[in-house]
Amino acid sequence: MVDEPVQVPHSIAEFVKGYEESGKLRGFRCSGCGLVTATWGIACPRCGRYPREEIELSSRGTVAAFTVQTVPGDEFLNDAPYAYVLVDLDGGGRVTGWMPGIRSEDALRVGERVHFAPSYKPGVQFAKDADSSPSPDGESQ
């Protein structure tokens, strides 16, 4: 039996360009196990099933982890320091991005609510939601 080549709907560059131009986060849902991911790929990273359904992801989520970048790459030189964040999106999926204006670790907390803020800058930019401070138990109010 000869394996047929996998038909890829588009390249990673086209996938990223699509969300940067449309202002919407995109991802995939596995029809087998239901995993929702923001990571481009041919098959599901959990169960290996192909193909996956391309979906629009939520533009809102919760900060799962972050670090403050003080030595940025060239395209972010004028924005440093800023936060590099890992966001758990509402409805599933996890995505990394950056948040300008976060100058210290005290300016952001794990559990804070954020939203996708499309920008002319490269990458996925997030901003804090109004009233997004986490409660003492770590959950957003």
Image (spheres, rainbow, N blue to C red):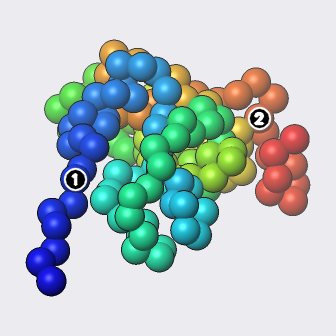
Q: Nearer the viewer, mark 2 or mark 1?
A: 1
Q: Would residue 118 be found to the left or right of residue 75 on screen?
A: right
Q: Would residue 10 be found to the left or right of residue 65 on screen?
A: left
41 or 117: nearer the eye?
41
Task: Residue at 16% x, 67% y: name it.
Answer: 4
Q: Please state the horizontal and vertical placement of residue 16, each as a whole percent of the image.
A: 31, 35
97 or 59: nearer the eye?
59
Which quadrant of the figure has residue 20? top left
Neighbor class of circle 1 (other Cα within 10 Å; few <14, some 14-19, many 20+) is few
Q: Is residue 111 above or below residue 115?
A: below
Which quadrant of the figure has residue 49? bottom left
Task: Residue at 55% x, 68% y: name it.
Answer: 32
Task: Residue at 48% x, 34% y: name it.
Answer: 25
Q: Would residue 14 be found to the left or right of residue 92 on screen?
A: left
Q: Please state the horizontal and vertical placement of residue 112, each as a whole percent of the image.
A: 71, 43
Real-space Cα separation, disc 2 to disc 1, in angstroms: 42 Å
Neighbor class of circle 2 (other Cα within 10 Å; few <14, some 14-19, many 20+) is some
Q: Earlier in the sequence, mark 2 or mark 1?
A: 1
Callout 2–callout 1 Cβ contact below 8 Å: no
Residue 66 in sight here: no
| Residue at image mark 1 | 7
Q: Amino acid at mark 1?
A: Gln
Q: Which mark is residue 132?
A: 2
27 or 121: nearer the eye?
27
Q: Is residue 88 above or below residue 20?
A: below
